[in-house]
Image (spheres, rainbow, N blue to C red):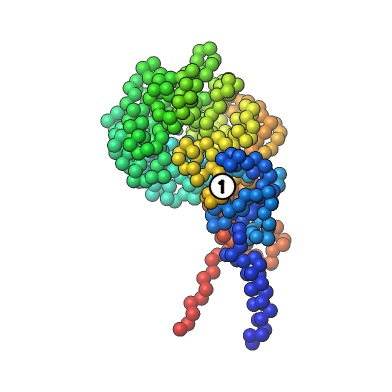
Amino acid sequence: MVYKYAPAVLLLSLWLGSKGYGQARYDLLLQGGHVIDPKNGISAVRDVAVKDGRIAAVAPHLDRKDALKTVSAAGLYVTPGLVDIHAHVYTGTGERASYAGDNSVYPDGFTFRVGVTTVADAGGSGWRNFEDFKQRVIDRSKTRVLAFLNIVGHGMRGAKFENDLADMEAAAAAEMAKRYPGLIVGFKTAHYAGPEWTPVEHAVEAGTMAGIPVMVDFGTDHPERPLADLVTKKLRPGDIYTHCYSGLRHELDDSGHVNPGMIEGRKRGVIFDVGHGGGSFAWRIAVPAIRQGFLPDSISTDLHIGSMNTGMKDMLNVMDKFLAMGLSLDDVIVRSTWNPAREIHHEELGNLSVGSPADIAVLRLETGRFGFTDMYGARMDGRRKLTCELTVHNGRVVYDLNGMSRPVWTTLPPGYTQVGDAAWDALNPKPVRRAPAKKQ
Ligand SMILES: [Zn+2]
């Protein structure tokens, strides 16, 4: 009886030997795309190979015979997975009108489809409810979710909490951050309506104790605490001023020039982040600032229910706006990948170095007639627009807009079922078959 199966066994072993199931040199190979990897100074056509969830090789030519799965990225841009350091994803608590509740969104519905593989929640939770956020969202999301911890112990739950100076304890916040290093990437102060510096000072104090940056949404404008003092005196190098094109706190002075304090603050090493949101990005601020050479360090969304369907929409839309203002694609990509990764001290992210987690966005740059709207509903026209074709997270395809990684159905056997392989595919992998237990 054995001979009857010999050819099949031989073929199988040949197949295993050549394709090397589980032994292929690469799990996934993206071939022929224009790679933009600012950390490594690459902006050229390259092949990118992935193995065991990490970048295995980037080179002008890699052999498809070495890969379990090859996908052609010709005509497309291949970039590190996008890193959005200002989003609001602490949802599911049922609390109304709260960024620790209904104002926030589950990340997976908004990330992979636009090439984002990492988000940082910008202060939804404080030290009192971070662990609730963690078990509710961080631990259950496919997206990599990190957090800026609000200096307010209760987090971003509305004015009653956010203006409570008694609930801004630096030591308690720092202690929580030290319990979750790498997960809590910074502190946030936001929406403060009073004239005091207390929220900023306590956030910086916590940041110094935990060795991580502070992100500031500077709240209500007050002459007692001018923006120039914030970025030239109060913040440390590496701290982040978000909403930098809002115009709500004299980002442009009365003569239409970039606030000299911001230029001075940048020289000191303070970081300027977009944080578009529902009410923090105006063309009449951004366009003159960019013309004067004041580019953002990082591009971020400030994603929440009030921005997701208005001017902001998604990460690629915010990036498109900077293309429309004349930045090159390379200039936009560095501000959406490597810069934000460094700002949150995650230097393994936002790049395609060999050994880095294989987070990759495959983007199409369309040309045509497009319109982009700001916080006031004013439009700017543009000729370029990014679309995400494919997203890879930790080495596996997590989004594929046009099925570029999938076989055409007519090429498959009748009665086909799941066709992918779990080594590279998180969408439709074949069920894992366990070997039947041997009878003793
Ligand atoms: Zn925000």
Is 152 left, or right, of 316 in this rendering? left
Is the residue 130 above or below the residue 14 in the image?
above
Q: Is mark 1 within 8 Å of ligand 1?
A: no
Please name the residue shown 60% across and 52% down the image.
Answer: 57
State whether residue 151 appears in this view: no
Residue drawn 55% across and 24% down? 294
| x 43%, y 36%: residue | 122
Quarter holding the C terminus is bottom left
Q: Position of residue 178 (x, y in %)?
A: 34, 43
Quarter of the picture holding the N terminus: bottom right
Q: In this rendered view, identify the residue nearer to me: 250 or 185.
A: 185
Residue farthest to the bottom, as pictured? 1
In the rendering, at what x and y percent does residue 353 appear?
56, 47
Foreground residue among 30 and 152: 30
Counting from the top left corner in percent of width and height, residue 48 is at: 63, 50
Q: How many marks?
A: 1
Q: Is residue 207 left or right of residue 44?
A: left
Residue at image x 70%, y 57%?
408
Q: Amino acid at mark 1?
A: Ser
Give the labeled residue for mark 1: 353
For the residue labelled by badge 1, is the local secondary structure a helix, a strand or a loop? loop
Q: Position of residue 326 (x, y in %)?
A: 64, 27
